[in-house]
Image (cartoon, rainbow, N blue to C red):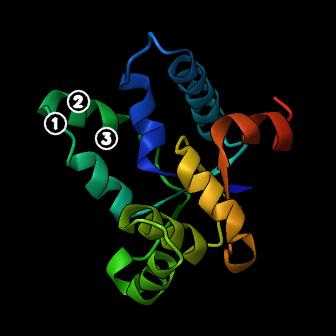
Amino acid sequence: MLVYLDSCCFSRPFTDMGIARNQRDASDFRVVMALLHTGRVRFACSNYLYEELSDAKPAALKRKLLALVPSPDVMAPQHSRLIDRVERLTQCGFDYGDAAHLACAESVEADFLLTTDDDFIELARQHATLLKAKVWSMHSWLGEVLDV
């Protein structure tokens, strides 16, 4: 199984842990990372993910985020090569970043794009027939797909 994680998954462990949802997502992220590092699940990545994580401030957070990214099993083409698909997805209501991640995930035939963004998940659900990758929360994916 091939999964693509958007940047909010990597950022979640560095958000306010006083919020129960953030605690759960950070815990789920650690489980997903363990699955990737053991090879039970394959990781798809993109230059767009690296670009988004590289924009993090301060520099110490940027270093921590980039250090979390495992070696990819599959690398998506540069998102600028996927601009037609990105534009089509933005016409469906996806913001540019979500559309770029989704286009990258689709380009490598990822089975799932994992995110912590509920709005992204809901919009993807509404347009599921148009998408080539399933957009799920890490929590739902762990519970329903992997039964972890």
Tell me which amino acid carries mark 3: Leu
The residue at the point 49 percent across, 15 percent down is 19
Is disc 1 in contact with disc 3, using a CB cutoff of under 8 Å?
no
Tell me which amino acid carries mark 1: Lys
The residue at the point 57 percent across, 25 percent down is 30
The residue at the point 54 percent across, 17 percent down is 23
The quadrant of the image that shows the C terminus is: top right
Name the secondary structure under disc 3: helix
Q: Which is closer to the viewer, label 1 or label 3?
A: 1
Give the camera-side residue of 36 and 119.
119
Query: What residue does disc 3 label?
Result: 66
Q: Which quarter of the picture shows residue 63?
A: top left
Tell me which amino acid carries mark 2: Leu
Is disc 2 in contact with disc 1, using a CB cutoff of under 8 Å?
yes
Distance Cα–Cα, label 2 vs label 1? 6 Å
The quadrant of the image that shows the N terminus is: bottom right
Name the secondary structure under disc 2: helix
Query: What residue does disc 1 label?
Result: 57
The residue at the point 49 percent across, 85 percent down is 88
The mark found on residue 61 in the picture is 2
Distance Cα–Cα, label 3 vs label 2? 9 Å
